[in-house]
Image: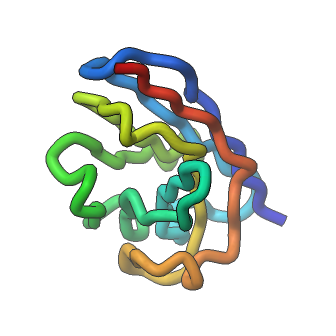
Amino acid sequence: QVQLVESGGGLVQAGDSLRLACAASGRTFSRYSMGWFRQAPGKEREFVGADSWSGGSTSYGDSVKGRFTIFRDDAKNTVYLQMNSLKPEDTAVYYCAGSEYREPRQNEFFYHLWGQGTQVTVSS
C-alpha cells in the first residue's frame, strides 16, 4: 500500500518562498502522476498543480501559475512543490495526491492516494 507523507509547511511572510515535499512509500513512484491541492477554511479543495509520470509534463492552477513549480526526484520517491512570491491568499492546508493516470489531472477524482496535509500560513 502506497503512503504519502507531506512536510515543509509553516508560517511565512508575504513574498517569501517555501518548499513542500511529499514522500511516497511502496510501489514504483515513477508510474504515478502526482498532484498538489489545497483547501482554505470554508472553501472547497482547489487544484494547485500536477505532473505526469516521471515528471515529464506539468499543469498548474491559474492562481499559482508562474509562482509555483512542481518537480520530483524519483530516486527518493519524493515530489516537491516550490512556492515563490507567496501571498496571504495562499494560506491553506496543502495535500499531495497520487494518480495512476499518465498525464497530470486537475480533477481530484482522478487521484486515489492522498497525504494527510500540511499547513501553510502566509502573513501579510
Residue 102 x, y percent position in the rendering: 43, 80
Residue 104 placement (x, y as % from top left): 38, 74
The x, y position of residue 4, in whole percent, is 70, 52
Which is more toward the observer, 88 or 55?
A: 88
Residue at the (56%, 46%) spot, across then down: 94
Picture quarter containing residue 83? Answer: top left
37 or 98, nearer to the observer: 37
- Viewport quadrant of the C terminus: top left
- Outermost residue, right side: 1
Residue in view at x 59 percent, y 66 percent? 98
Q: From the viewer's perspective, is 90 left or right of 10? A: left
- Residue 67 figure quarter: top left
Q: Residue furthest front?
A: 42
In the figure, is residue 11 to the left or right of 23?
left
Vertical order, 79 against 98 (above or below): above
- Residue 3 left/right relative to 33: right
Using the image, determine if residue 13 lies above or below residue 101.
above
Residue 43 vertical position relative to residue 13 in the rendered view, above or below = below
State the residue in front, 34 or 94.
94
Percent x, y for residue 73? 45, 43
